[in-house]
């Protein structure tokens, strides 16, 4: 398996998001079974192509874009909340935000399975 399809699990503590090739890979923290819930989604935000591997995870386990705070469900790749701004502006854009959210629900992020194998998290 190529090295660009894996990351040391120690580099992905709960709440972390990292770049692994073309993917934003993260750890949503322990699930009901106590095991960490890893994910992998394509790295480019559907709004203005920000690098989602620089994003954060919110309390709901959604990946939040670092530029304008669009939120993505990492299980489906769907944008669940549109951006809060455009270009350098960071503030309300109600009609525009809904339009981008609609686009993001149709043009979802690609989703790839990420599982722990030994000391690594591997993309299947």
Image (cartoon, helix red, strand yellow):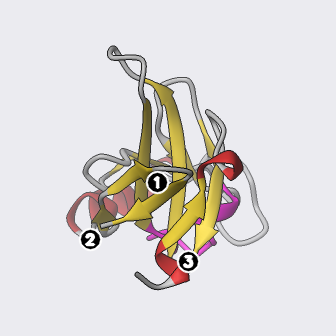
Residue marked by disc 1: 97
What residue is drawn where x is 38% and y is 21%?
31
- Which residue carries the number 2 mark? 107
Distance in Å between CA atoms under marks 3 and 2: 13 Å
Mark 1 crowdedness (10 Å alpha carbons): few <14, some 14-19, many ≥20: some
Question: Is 39 displayed left or right of 57 in the figure?
Answer: left
Residue furthest to the bottom: 2
Which region of the structure is painted magenta?
Answer: 42-55
Q: Residue drawn 33% across and 17% down?
A: 33
x, y percent for residue 100: 40, 62
Q: Is residue 36 magenta?
A: no
Specify few, some or many for label 3: CA neighbours under 10 Å numbering under 14, 14-19, or 20 or more. few
Residue 114 percent across, percent down from the top left: 37, 56
Q: Using the image as rendered, state which of residue 46 and residue 121 is in the foreground.
A: 121
- Front residue of 44 and 20: 20
Identify the residue at image location x=69%, y=56%.
66
Vertical side of 33 occupied by 53: above or below: below
- Regarding residue 96, the answer to whether it shows in the image is yes
For marks 1 and 3, give the one nearer the viewer.
3
Q: What secondary structure is marked by label 1?
A: helix
Which badge, 1 or 3, comes first in the chain's sequence? 3
* Residue under pointer 3: 49
> Does the CB distance between marks 3 and 2 fall below 8 Å?
no
Along the horizontal axis of the image, is 97 left or right of 33? Answer: right
């Amino acid at each position: 398996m190529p090295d660009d399809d894996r990351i040391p699990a120690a580099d992905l503590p709960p709440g972390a998001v990292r770049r692994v090739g073309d993917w934003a890979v993260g750890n949503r923290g322990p699930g009901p079974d106590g095991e960490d819930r890893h994910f992998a989604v394509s790295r480019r935000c559907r709004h203005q192509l920000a690098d989602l591997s620089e994003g954060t995870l919110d309390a709901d386990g959604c990946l939040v874009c670092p530029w304008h705070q669009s939120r993505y469900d990492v299980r489906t790749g769907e944008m669940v909340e549109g951006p809060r701004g455009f270009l350098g502006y960071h503030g309300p854009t109600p009609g525009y935000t809904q339009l981008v959210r609609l686009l993001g629900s149709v043009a979802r992020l690609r989703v790839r399975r990420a599982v722990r194998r030994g000391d690594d998290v591997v993309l299947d």
